[in-house]
Amino acid sequence: MSARDDLTTYAATTRTITADSIAPYINAVEKAAYDRAIEAVRAEYLTGDTGTPEDEAYNQGISDAIVAIDGLVEIDALNEQSTT
């Protein structure tokens, strides 16, 4: 079952939904989205790298994008810790 399915099931079967009770489900949905984004970006790596400066720069851009997405995950985790 996906994080989204878990959230939908929880919302459909719970009489009272509070921000605190739904937060873990929202976090799981966000994490799944970050994971999918990273997977999509990784798929863009050049596998037949010719060693040209352009190819190296392109692959460096892909690496930078992954680092940026990971940074968002870390920021969200820190924000979550500061609110609990």
Image (cartoon, rainbow, N blue to C red):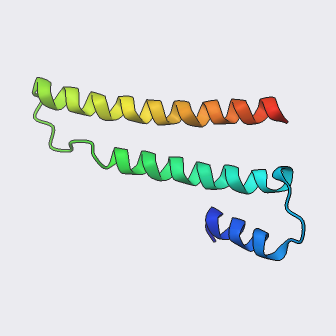
Residue that lies at the very extreme toward the top in this rendered image: 53
**How many marks overall?**
0
Decide which of 3, 60 is in the foreground and name it: 3
The residue depicted at 21 percent of the width and 42 percent of the height is 46
Q: Residue at x 35, y 32 (%)?
A: 63
> Vertically, is 60 above or below 37?
above
Q: Position of residue 69 (x, y in %)?
A: 48, 36
Residue 41 located left or right of residue 58: right
**Side of 20 where 52 appears, left or right:** left
Q: Position of residue 81 (x, y in %)?
A: 78, 33
Left or right for 25, reference 32: right
Position of the N terminus, as image quadrant, is: bottom right
User: Which image quadrant for residue 61?
Assistant: top left
The location of residue 73, given as percent across then percent down, is: 58, 37
Q: Residue furthest right?
A: 16
Q: Position of residue 68 (x, y in %)?
A: 46, 30
Viewer-side residue, 20 vs 32: 20
**Residue 61 versus residue 23: which sits nearer the camera?**
23
Q: Residue at the spot x=52%, y=35% of the render?
A: 70
Front-lying residue, 34 or 42: 34
As drawn, 13 above or below 70: below
Q: Residue at x 85, y 71 (%)?
A: 14
Locate the C terminus and report the quarter of the image it occupies: top right
Residue 51 sits above or below residue 34 on the image: above
Quadrant for residue 17, please give it: bottom right
